[in-house]
Amino acid sequence: GPCPAASFACDNGTLCVPRRQMCDSRNDCADSSDENPVECGLLYGSKEIADKIVRNAIEKKQQRLISAVSNASGADSTTSMVPRNQSLTLNMTCDIVTYPKACQCGQGTILYCGRYAKLRRFPRLSSEVTNLIIIRNNLILRDNIFANFTRLQKLTLKYNNISRVPLGSFSGLFHLEHLELSHNNVSHLPHGVFLGLHSLQWLFLVNNHLHHLPVEQLRFFRRLEWLVLSRNRLTLRNVQLPKIPTLYEVYLDFNRIEYIGEETFSQLDNLHLLDLQHNLITHIHGRAFANLTNMRDIRLVGNPIKELSGETFLHNTRLEALSLALMPIHISSSLMEPLNISFLNLTGIRYDHIDFEAINSMRNLTYIIYDRFFYCSMTPRVRMCKPSTDGVSSFQDLLSKPVLR
């Protein structure tokens, strides 16, 4: 084969990476084929959120088409004022009266200020804006800075070197649905900073310096669906997340969590996806997930967990995907037997730590990822298995040839 044993050939065939690096949340292949979202089971989780993302994209495309058609039909009455080659692009008009010339406004009330805007302070804007995107500038937030933007629905402030978020930063944003403060230097969120954000559905705080999860802040959210706190310094020590009936997905990967207690997530009974990958977790209470009866996807990749109680996933009857890769864990029959999952990631788990008989008897399991190809021969009933080849034989060979099986 194109790659040596225990390695994976990228789709273009020019690069080989260790199989243990498949589905480990890092792109090792130039074409990202080692992190294929379908093959790595990343399309599990909340169907509600996935549907909303797709639906929003479709609606936006339809709106653009309708706008283009309506503008084209009215082109005859406007050609005296607008050059002919622009008569079909009138849908790219800006409805924001005042904004910096260095920013881009071409879709109604959406304003984008990228790195070339070179903003050193918050720009002068009129109140029509509904979607404000400021990326790779240098911003200092202050009290009531957005108070006049009562129509604002989406606010993105990524890569702006923001280190301080004053108490009244988001005052007056009663219609805000999406807030992203990712890739900044925020280490503290004052009590009450999110007060009044009753419409907020998505909160992204990826790659900041948060040490403490402001649990009391989350109580203010009545419609929160998606909470992303990846790549911070959170420990969740003595923390219990409050009841948020609408919360579907929580991302806490790449933090400093060491222990998951019985009460940590117990009130999030509608949660569909919980991502705890690449933390420092050594122990999970046997009933930590007992109340999460709607859970579809649990990700524990890259934690130093040696053992999980057979009770750990006993009550997660709707669980579809489980990722236990890159851990020193024993995959026992007591852990596997209660599961009704269709996807299982065991990349990096030692051969002598896996009860293959228990896995082979899992009726609904259709996709599994191991560390090495020959593991697939131990569970021939599982329809799809990765790695799919060792450079000589393929998984199809295992299924069709008893000798190889």
Image (spheres, grey):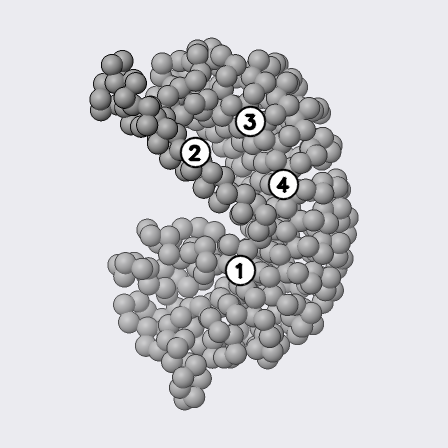
Q: Could you tell me if the residues under marks 4 and 3 are in contact, i.e. CB atoms within 8 Å? A: no
Residue labelled with disc 2: 63
Along the viewing direction, whichever of 219 and 153 lies nearer the viewer: 153
The correct choice, above or below, for 2 with respect to 260 in the image is below
Say which label, 2 or 3, has the lower sequence index: 2
Among the two numbered marks 4 and 3 on one chain, the one whose residue lies closer to the N terminus: 3
Where residue 16 appears, as percent x and y from the top left, is 32, 61
- Mark 1 to mark 4 CA distance (whole Å): 29 Å
Rendered-image quadrant of the N terminus: bottom left
The residue that disc 4 covers is: 225
Q: Position of residue 121 (x, y in %)?
A: 47, 13
Residue 326's mark? 1
Whichever of callouts 1 and 3 sits on the residue coming sooner in the sequence is: 3
| Residue pointed to by mark 3 | 153
**Of the residues shown, which amino acid type is indicated by label 3?**
Gln
Q: CA distance from mark 2 to mark 4?
A: 25 Å
Of residues 194 and 245, the one nearer the viewer is 245
Task: Note whether 349 is above or below 127 in the view shown.
Answer: below
Q: Residues within 10 Å of mark 3 (few under 14, many from 20)?
A: some
Disc 4 marks which amino acid?
Glu
Left or right of 147 on screen, residue 401: left
Q: Residue at x 68, y 29 (%)?
A: 198
- Between marks 1 and 2 in the image, the one whose residue lies nearer the viewer: 2
Q: Are marks 1 and 3 in contact (CB under 8 Å)?
A: no
At 50% from the left and 17% from the top, the residue drawn is: 128
Residue 155 position within the rendered picture, expressed as x and y whole percent measured from the top left: 52, 26
Q: Secondary structure at mark 2?
A: helix
